[in-house]
Image: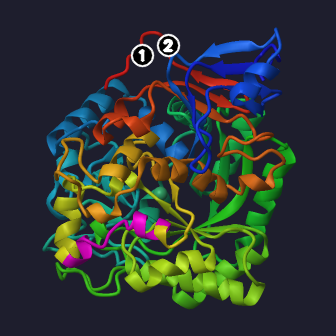
């Protein structure tokens, strides 16, 4: 519905309804819902309809974001701007600049830096001391599983040569046993978080608002926040109550193995608080589990050891028995399990846990999901379809960029490297593939991800023909994963109108693109412009005349 409540008639472009339907030339929206398509839309539109000229562009169901961290992403603008830095020296210079311009900040908090700038991801506290030594500095790495502290932050957290290795974490050290400056995974990061006051409440509400607008500008109308802790709930409730959410959000409440199942009643209560707000833009029907860490830190859990010999098999965050019982418990409580699993051992443990839950509770109606699925044993891939598990994958990661060649390939070795991100195999097996960006770990733009998902090439077109080319997707399959696939993950069909495909009665959640991605070379897809985004017929983003297509 427009502000005026008039019906909307979209014409003069291609209307893509979803993979199984023929293209149409027009779409009529009445009261925020799809009313008619094609010639019927033209015929049914009355005199009073608002006519929207697509200018030869492409109208399709809006994108869903299957896995992201909106508050983290929005907060990256609140500290030193280290995301765009291309070297350790640039990061240090930016931290120095920010500290100088913000003398009142007692803590310098920043995100997120590229972990491939230092060999093995080993960043030294003393490098940051050069920029700031009198105040604590804590920077998160792009993976959000690692932080880099200066010496003052380590000192305030009480981390020194005598600190024992924490459970579920790691403190890399110098030869003399003193902490280097990097902390890996919660067990270690929590030591500094315990004394770090974090960002204040209004900054976080603001960050969420900015994140929501950022997603709308990319054609996204639904976002899975894949890591929500208890103090984030109030940020969401405040944003919803103040009408600041330009997109729908579903919250995945973090389950910590050190506090589960004791924390389950709090999750049930958090869900009830969200439901009590009665916002059409906010749900909290998921629980997040981290089955493992990440390959780049050697905390991703592997069936066979890492090649480098630093660690053996990585880190399972939950014992298989504890994960199985816990997934069963959240499923019984009506939550969808959203399980981070990167390594093949983590993927297997997650699938086993879901299978266990089904054996106790019966087949799940909550559509359990496994996020990332970077490496899975060939025998486990078919289990996604068999168990009704939704893979939530990041198409942008399926390329031979520096992250892959510098941090991943040396750790996995050539054979396992070729076995990563098997999206095509999963689709062909009958699984419902869904996509997400993991923003701010990587670009939130669906068109950036789709470009890689269909080409498996870097922005420079390397390697020609694509890396592991058998796993390339058709453009329509990639669009489906980012629309109907995410709608399946979101349980959108449980709401009265549904979204993710253009069908009569569906919510008019739409994105208008400047060109049809199916007709463009894969590497040009990121240059297609988002002209407008609609959520239930309301325009949540409109490109200005100045924002040029950069194809
Ligand atoms: Zn994530």
Residue 368 got which mark? none
Question: Quadrant where the C terminus lies?
Answer: top left
Magenta stretch contains residue 423: yes
> Which residue sits at x=38%, y=68%?
422
Q: Residues within 10 Å of mark 1 (few under 14, many from 20)?
A: few
49 above or below 476? above
In the image, is 374 to the left or to the right of 456?
right
Q: Mark 1 points at which residue?
A: 547
Q: Name the residue under label 2.
A: 544
> Which residue sits at x=84%, y=47%?
496
Question: Quadrant where the N terminus lies?
Answer: top right
Query: Where is residue 175 shown, x and y percent of the image?
Result: 13, 74
In the image, is 92 to the left or to the right of 21?
left
Residue 329 sits in quarter: bottom right
Residue 71 sits in quarter: top right
236 above or below 428? above
Query: Where is residue 357 shown, x and y percent of the image?
Result: 68, 84
Nearer to us in this view, 531 or 404: 531
In the image, is 253 to the left or to the right of 443?
right
> Which residue sits at x=52%, y=41%?
199
* Real-space Cα separation, disc 2 to disc 1, in angstroms: 6 Å
Part of the protein shown in magenta? 415-427
Q: Residues within 10 Å of mark 2 (few under 14, many from 20)?
A: few
Query: Where is residue 171 shown, x and y percent of the image?
Result: 30, 70
In what element is the residue under mark 1? loop
> Which residue sits at x=72%, y=34%?
508
């Amino acid at each position: 519905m427009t502000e005026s409540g008039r019906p909307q008639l979209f014409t003069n472009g291609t209307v893509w309804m979803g993979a199984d339907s023929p293209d149409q030339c027009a779409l009529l929206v009445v009261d925020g819902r799809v009313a008619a398509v094609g010639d019927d839309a033209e015929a049914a539109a009355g005199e009073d309809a608002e006519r929207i000229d697509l200018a030869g562009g492409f109208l399709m169901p809006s994108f869903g974001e299957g896995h992201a961290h909106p508050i983290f992403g929005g907060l990256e603008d609140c500290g030193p701007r280290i995301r765009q830095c291309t070297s350790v020296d640039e990061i240090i210079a930016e931290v120095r600049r920010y500290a100088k311009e913000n003398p009142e900040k007692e803590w310098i908090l920043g995100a997120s830096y590229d972990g491939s700038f230092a060999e093995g991801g080993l960043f030294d506290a003393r490098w940051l001391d050069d920029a700031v030594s009198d105040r604590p500095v804590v920077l998160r790495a792009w993976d959000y599983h690692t932080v880099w502290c200066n010496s003052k932050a380590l000192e305030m957290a009480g981390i020194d040569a005598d600190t024992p290795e924490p459970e579920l974490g790691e403190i890399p050290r110098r030869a003399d046993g003193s902490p280097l400056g990097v902390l890996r995974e919660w067990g270690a990061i929590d030591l500094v978080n315990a004394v770090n006051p974090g960002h204040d409440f209004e900054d976080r509400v603001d960050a969420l608002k900015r994140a929501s607008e950022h997603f709308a500008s990319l054609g996204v109308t639904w976002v899975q926040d894949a890591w929500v802790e208890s103090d984030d709930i109030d940020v969401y409730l405040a944003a919803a109550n103040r009408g600041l959410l330009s997109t729908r959000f579903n919250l995945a409440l973090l389950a910590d193995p050190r506090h589960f199942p004791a924390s389950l009643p709090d999750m049930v209560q958090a869900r009830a608080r969200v439901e009590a707000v009665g916002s059409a833009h906010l749900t909290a029907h998921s629980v997040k589990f981290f089955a493992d860490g990440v390959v780049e830190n050697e905390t991703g859990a592997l069936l066979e050891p890492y090649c480098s010999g630093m660690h053996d098999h990585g880190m399972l965050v939950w014992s298989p028995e504890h994960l199985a019982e816990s997934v069963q418990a959240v499923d019984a409580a009506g939550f969808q399990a959203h399980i981070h699993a990167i390594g093949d051992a983590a993927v297997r443990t997650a699938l086993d846990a879901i299978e266990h839950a089904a054996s106790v509770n019966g087949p799940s109606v909550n559509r359990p999901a496994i996020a990332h699925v970077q490496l899975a044993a060939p025998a486990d891939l078919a289990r996604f379809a068999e168990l009704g598990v939704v893979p939530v994958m990041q198409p942008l990661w399926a390329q031979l960029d520096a992250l892959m060649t510098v941090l991943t390939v040396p750790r996995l070795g050539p054979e396992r490297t070729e076995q990563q991100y098997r999206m095509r195999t999963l689709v062909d097996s009958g699984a419902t593939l869904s996509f997400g960006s993991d923003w701010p770990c990587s670009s939130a733009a669906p068109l950036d991800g789709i470009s890689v998902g269909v080409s498996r090439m870097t922005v420079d077109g390397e390697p020609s023909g694509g890396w592991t080319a058998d796993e390339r997707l058709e453009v329509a399959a990639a669009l489906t994963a980012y629309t109907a696939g995410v709608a399946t993950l979101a349980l959108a069909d449980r709401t009265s109108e549904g979204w993710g495909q253009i069908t009569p009665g569906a919510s008019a959640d739409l994105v208008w693109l400047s060109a049809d991605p199916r007709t463009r070379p894969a590497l040009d897809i990121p240059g297609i412009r988002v002209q407008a985004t609609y959520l239930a017929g309301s325009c949540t983003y409109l490109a200005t005349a100045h924002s040029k297509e950069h194809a």
